[in-house]
Image (spheres, rainbow, N blue to C red):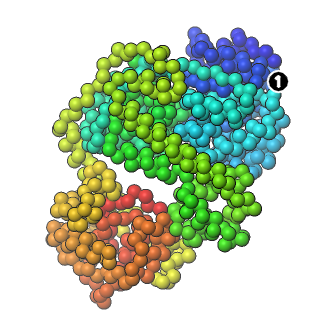
Amino acid sequence: MSCNPHRALELLRQGTGRPEAVFREGQEEAIRHVVDGRGRLLVVQKTGWGKSFVYFIATKLLRESGSGLTLLISPLLALMRNQIAAAKRMGVSAATINSDNTDDWATVEAAIQRNEVDILLISPERLANERFRTEVLAAVAGRIALLVIDEAHCISDWGHDFRPHYRLIERIVRTLPPNLRLLATTATANNRVMDDLKAVLGPNLSVSRGDLSRPSLMLQTMRLPSQSERLAWLAAQVAALPGHGIIYTLTVRDAVQVADWLKSQGLNVASYTGETGECRAELEQALLDNQVKALVATTALGMGFDKPDLAFVIHYQTPGSVVAYYQQVGRAGRALDAAYGVLLSGEEETEITDYFIESAFPTHEEVRKVLDALEAAPRGLSVPELLGKINVSKGRIEKTIALLALESPAPIAKQGTKWQLTAANLSESFWERAERLTALRRDEQRQMQEYVSLTSGHMEFLIQALDGDPRTVRPHSLPLLPTSIDPALVNAAVAYLRRTSLPIEPRKQWPAGGMPLYNVKGNIQVNLQAQQGKALCIWGDAGWGSLVRNGKYRERQFSDVLVEACAALVREWNPQPAPAWVTCIPSRRHPVLVPNFAQRLAATLSLPFHAVLEKTVDRPEQKTMANSVQQARNIDGSLSVGIVQLPSGPVLLIDDMVDSRWTITVAAWLLRSHGSAEVFPLALALTGHDK
């Protein structure tokens, strides 16, 4: 069929809601290429160019000519609300099948069978679902007119955002008829990624690649090592900046903390993370409608979010790669003459990006433990059963299983709820890929530190790193933002960081299989549980966290400042009924550290201290136990109450570190079982990775 340019322009204007809209350079040509069936096409265009209009308009034109439906594979279903709304304005019927709308599956599948769906949106993970492949995809395979692979850089394991389930697309593409229309889109593909995509999507892949320069963006970097300095800078500058924007952080905890700090300084902001849940759409709309000054976000607010008049994007820490940074900062200034892209660099960012790099692939030992456990269980093991067999965290087990299962041939396969070994061995290419990508991530990390050090030429640096042409960059007229910081705001930020406390939620159930040595299992009786407790900080974090770490491993004693801070926390917390005495968790490795701190805290609170708990047997440190079941068993039988008659009244139970909460849970259960009143846990720090 032949593309009708007048109809295409009409659909663009309907979709944008702008009667004067015209195609951007390359848009109409891409639509014509797809509709006319000229072969497979890769569109590489910067964010905001309008890639979604290419596939929605092409879909509508194909459907109007009597063709079948479009299948769109995208990792961004939850963030495609804007695009789907535009599609509906064009009269495109879009439906999705994903893990969040299981109640709608039957309705959607019936509509597909009736040929009432123009474009079906699925995540790459859906391709791993056997029921979807056999009952839904197989039924429409012969009627698919166009396959769209959105965020196609995810296919390439050279890309910054490689997603394992995208490897399934490679296998599907190999089986497609050569004349099937295929459109792949991405904003972030350097030459290395493009070569990879050509290898996967076919040697005759045509490429439409645009200019990478963003003339509206004024880019700036500054090193502000401490979190208090960056919080102070944000409080002053975000308030002064015109318009609305996004502040990116590397972790969920930082997003929440930065948002709370800015709110305490009178700024109308909100945090947006993968844990925001059902409020995400509401928060996106609030930013689109300029009802909030900024969203403080993780990469959860990334690909797929489009606010053309975003006036600034600020990074609280340095991301791990140029590609990731270019994509995020490129959300600003799409429809503005001028916008700010500011990168703040802090001392903790390398530790965070190191963690992301080191945890991207399972270790040799983790793979060996999983495979050995499955080999010893011919009928297979579920993930909960694996947790009881091997000392590996749940997240690491799930990652290991996911990556092994996606190998071809795969050394493991799922039967019902259990994983079993197959006849295939794990290929050496698995480890070669892991080593290659880990080395690549290290190079990207170093490249971003080079970027941070620049005093000029920021856009040129990014474009060159992305294999674009830096000669297209034009000088910018926006003034640089101030780098000076108000000392009073820094002091306020320090006070804020030290004012926070965190809840320690009581465990209500014993682990799967119970605690054999204590002879308990199932639910923990309410009257034998700990009360909700408090922790002063996150281990090693800004505020008190570094002081706790210094006290434990350098000074071998917690400072008087921490005693006063915990005393102030208890007074503000005011647990009821009020604690009448203090005790602590014992340790054979550090017999003095926690009792010394607990005694000094008790004295400051004018409460008696009684060391009533005893460590009866040496066990490995809890931090060496990688999952909750292993941590629980490590405590089983290792604590006891050493006196017959406990002091009367509620007790404050002190520990330095809380990780899995099993030590606190067992200690509270023992105290309550021996007649104690309410037990209120108080810890200096949470490790930040309770399993």
Residue 372, x across and y down, in percent: 63, 68
What residue lies at 53% left-to-right and 38% top-to-bottom?
Answer: 160
- Along the line of sight, which residue is nearer the eye, 179 or 120? 179
Circle 1 crowding by C-alpha within 10 Å: few under 14, some 14–19, many from 20: few
Residue 164, x across and y down, in percent: 62, 46
- Along the line of sight, which residue is nearer the eye, 178 or 64? 178
Is 308 situated above or below 681?
above
**Residue type marked 1:** Gly
- Along the line of sight, which residue is nearer the eye, 376 or 296? 376
What residue lies at 38% left-to-right and 22% top-to-bottom?
Answer: 457
Assign the N terminus to one quadrant of the image: top right
Is 137 situated above or below 675?
above
Furthest residue to the right? 142
Residue 424 appears anywhere in the view:
yes
Residue under numbered circle 1: 66
Residue 402, x across and y down, in percent: 63, 54
Residue 652 appears anywhere in the view:
no
Horizontal side, residue 456 vs residue 384: left or right:
left
Horizontal side, residue 600 vs residue 14: left or right:
left
- Along the line of sight, which residue is nearer the eye, 497 or 346? 346
Q: Quadrant of residue 183?
A: top right
What residue lies at 48% left-to-right and 51% top-to-bottom?
Answer: 358
What residue lies at 52% left-to-right and 23% top-to-bottom?
Answer: 468
Is 83 situated above or below 472?
below
